[in-house]
């Protein structure tokens, strides 16, 4: 069996995803064994491999971390196409490129708006998120990074507004490195755990970026 093992322990985001991308592009292995040492890398690598026609299984290691076992689900006739997809655009960005045409991205870096009073800033953020549906179909994606990831966890006062946005079709990406930093990975209730490669690609593809 064409199998490649990748040791991605200790690699910062988005290096584990990039290493998998390069491996698929160069070798198109039938099976990839990826070792990671944090939940954010586990979710990001798993999601990326699934977009590249790999089925994914997870196993915990006796030492800290996980092993991701990815097996190609593409037959011989589609293996070349899978390689081309990995070579051209990472993750699900081929689909994103089409969807992002004339779409607006909201890039949120804090769980409050403004400075001076955190309670007021929190209420302003809730009001802002509750008002975003007024953008209509032009609202394409929301990215939560740094302290903004706290908006999408259980018991967050902003969670209901974000859930309504996601239910309406708005894509929500939540920084996995940030969730790990604040030790909130197991409390995430909304969106997809993402990496810096997805963030940069989304910023590039959006027709307009609103930073909060």
Image (cartoon, rainbow, N blue to C red):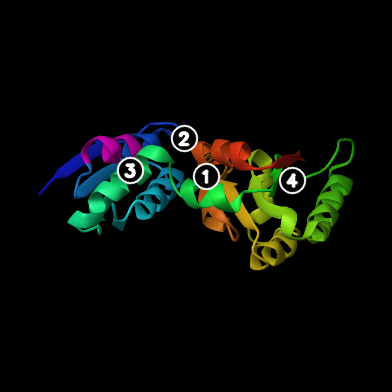
User: Tag 3 or tag 2, which sits nearer the N-term?
Assistant: 2
Task: Name the element at disc 4.
Answer: loop
The residue that disc 2 covers is 13
The stretch of residues the image draws in magenta is: 21-27
Task: Name the element at disc 2.
Answer: loop
On the image, which quarter does residue 127 sit in? Answer: bottom right
Q: Report if residue 75 is visible in the image.
A: yes
User: Tag 1 or tag 2, which sits nearer the N-term?
Assistant: 2
Q: Is residue 20 left or right of residue 44?
A: left
Disc 1 to disc 3, how far (Cα)? 27 Å
User: Tag 3 or tag 1, which sits nearer the N-term?
Assistant: 3
User: Extreme left residue here?
Assistant: 1
Q: Main secondary structure of the magenta part?
A: helix
Disc 2 to disc 1, how far (Cα)? 9 Å
Residue 18 in the image: above or below residue 83: above
Looking at the rendered structure, which numbered label has been put on residue 84?
3
Judge by depth and name the residue closer to the eye, 206 or 47: 206
The residue that disc 4 covers is 111
Percent x, y for residue 117?
89, 41
Label 1 Cα crowd, 10 Å radius (few <14 / some 14-19 / many 20+): many
Disc 2 to disc 4, how far (Cα)? 22 Å
Name the image quarter holding the C terminus.
top right
Q: Report if residue 67 is visible in the image.
A: no
Label 3 Cα crowd, 10 Å radius (few <14 / some 14-19 / many 20+): few
Residue 65 in the image: above or below residue 165: above
The residue that disc 1 covers is 176
Label 2 Cα crowd, 10 Å radius (few <14 / some 14-19 / many 20+): some
């Amino acid at each position: 069996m064409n199998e490649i093992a990748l040791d991605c322990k200790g690699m910062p985001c988005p290096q584990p995803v990039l290493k998998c991308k390069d491996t698929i592009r160069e070798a198109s292995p039938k099976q990839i064994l990826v070792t990671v040492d944090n939940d954010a890398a586990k979710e990001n690598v798993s999601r990326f491999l699934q977009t590249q026609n790999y089925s994914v299984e997870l196993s915990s290691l006796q030492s800290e971390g996980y092993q991701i076992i990815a097996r190609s689900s593409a037959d011989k006739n589609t293996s070349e196409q899978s390689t081309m997809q990995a070579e051209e655009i990472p993750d699900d960005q081929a689909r994103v490129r089409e969807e992002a045409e004339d779409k607006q991205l909201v890039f949120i870096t804090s769980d409050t708006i403004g400075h001076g009073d955190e309670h007021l800033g929190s209420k302003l953020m809730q009001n802002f998120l509750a008002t975003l549906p007024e953008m209509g179909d032009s609202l394409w994606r929301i990215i939560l990074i740094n302290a903004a990831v706290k908006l999408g966890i259980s018991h967050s006062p902003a969670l209901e507004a974000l859930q309504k946005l996601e239910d309406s079709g708005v894509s929500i990406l939540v920084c996995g490195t940030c969730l790990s930093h604040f030790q909130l990975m197991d409390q995430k209730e909304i969106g997809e755990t993402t990496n810096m490669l997805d963030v940069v690609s989304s910023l590039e593809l959006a027709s307009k970026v609103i930073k909060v």
